[in-house]
């Protein structure tokens, strides 16, 4: 009898959780997500309209504002202005069934280090909707991981570099210089898509201006190799590279080559702590990427 009561109570609780998880924040009931392809077609039309019907003002400090072009506020459209050319990147999302065209503007690339899509960055930013209403901003730099925010950031920010900072003393001791800064125009599929957020309607394209000051390289699986280096070629996306095809990208895979030996046990260090990428069988592939190697130190 007691077990039946416990089971019934558990069933009621789980049913409540399931129903709540299917409901929109507005309380209007369960709704199906829109088709990614159909929504992208609407988003790219909206962003094209915005780019053709607004001009931007950029201060010497790379703060950006967008203004509608009207008879009272004439200006050169974002697309047609030449000082900071509009560019785009094609981003394929297989799970969406969409290849996104992502517009961006490079005010300055930056002069120091480039993050990967999974590193932590120190940035200031401002986010606006296509009606130019601001929904978020961080005028003072803050830290966050690029793979912990909307997906579009991980696609665009790694195209920029950090700058340099100096300690000049006085009341404002830190001075930044030569940092990367730009704007990204994100379809909702690379933003929040159907998720409700404060000040952001569902299925909203998002426009971010940003300044990239500093970064911290990460080692997601703590195997001794930075996540940015767990790829086939420098600059590849760590989120996409899976050497052994087990469905886990190398950056999160404790056994990169699937040979049963943990990657951290297939690396050795010299007396200064530098990693030695040993190749015991001499086939040109280091042990940690070679399923034919047993991972032992070469004799």
Image: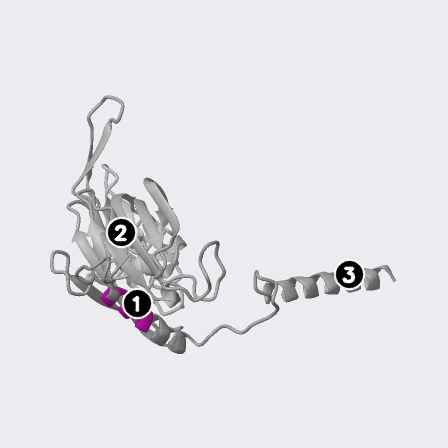
| 215 vs 220, nearest the viewer | 215
Q: Main secondary structure of the magenta part?
A: helix
Give how far across and how far down residue 140 sits, in percent: 33, 39
Mark whose residue sits in front, 2 or 3: 2
Farthest front residue in view: 72
Q: Residue at x 28, y 44 (%)?
A: 215
Give how far across and how far down residue 287 sits, in percent: 28, 58
Extent of the magenta region? 44-52
| 133 vs 243, nearest the viewer | 133
Q: What coloring was used for the rendering? A: one colour
Q: Which disc number belongs to residue 9? A: 3
Q: Residues within 10 Å of mark 3 (few under 14, many from 20)?
A: few
Q: Is residue 124 above or below residue 77?
A: above
Q: Give the Cα distance between marks 2 and 1.
A: 16 Å
Farthest top residue in view: 170
- The answer to whether one can see residue 170 in this image is yes
Q: Residue at x 47, y 74 (%)?
A: 34
Q: Secondary structure at mark 2?
A: strand
Q: Quadrant of residue 8?
A: bottom right
Give how far across and how far down residue 70 sits, in percent: 25, 62
Q: Earlier in the sequence, mark 2 or mark 3?
A: 3
Which quadrant is home to the N terminus?
Answer: bottom right
Q: Earlier in the sequence, mark 2 or mark 1?
A: 1
Q: Give the Cα distance between marks 2 and 3.
A: 55 Å
Q: Which disc number belongs to residue 65? A: 2
What residue does disc 1 label? 47
Q: Quadrant of residue 87?
A: bottom left
| 181 vs 271, nearest the viewer | 181
Q: Residues within 10 Å of mark 1 (few under 14, many from 20)?
A: many
Farthest right residue in view: 1
Q: Quadrant of residue 138?
A: top left
């Amino acid at each position: 009898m007691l077990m039946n009561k416990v089971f019934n109570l558990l069933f009621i609780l789980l049913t409540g959780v399931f129903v709540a998880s299917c409901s929109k924040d507005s309380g209007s009931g369960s709704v199906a997500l829109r088709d990614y392809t159909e929504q992208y077609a609407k988003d790219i039309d909206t962003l094209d309209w915005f780019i053709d019907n607004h001009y931007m003002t950029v201060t010497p400090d790379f703060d950006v504002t967008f203004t509608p072009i009207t008879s009272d506020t004439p200006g050169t459209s974002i697309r047609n202005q030449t000082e900071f050319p509009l560019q785009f990147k094609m981003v394929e999302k297989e799970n969406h069934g969409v290849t996104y065209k992502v517009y961006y503007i490079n005010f300055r690339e930056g002069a120091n280090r480039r993050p990967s899509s999974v590193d932590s960055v120190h940035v200031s930013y401002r986010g606006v909707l296509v009606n130019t209403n601001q929904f978020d901003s961080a005028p003072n730099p803050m830290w966050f991981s690029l793979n912990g925010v909307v997906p579009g950031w991980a696609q665009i920010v790694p195209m920029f570099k950090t700058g340099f900072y100096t300690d000049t003393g006085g009341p404002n001791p830190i001075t930044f210089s030569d940092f990367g800064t730009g704007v990204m125009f994100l379809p909702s599929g690379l933003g929040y898509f159907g998720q409700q957020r404060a000040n952001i309607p569902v299925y909203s394209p998002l426009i971010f201006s940003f300044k990239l000051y500093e970064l911290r390289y990460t080692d997601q699986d703590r195997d001794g190799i930075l996540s940015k280096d767990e790829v086939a070629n420098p600059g590849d996306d760590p989120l996409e590279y899976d050497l052994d095809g087990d469905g886990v990208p190398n950056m999160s895979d404790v056994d990169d080559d699937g040979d049963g030996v943990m990657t951290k046990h297939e690396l050795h260090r010299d007396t200064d702590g530098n990693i030695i990428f040993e190749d015991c069988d001499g086939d040109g592939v280091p042990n940690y990427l070679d399923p034919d190697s047993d991972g032992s130190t070469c004799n």
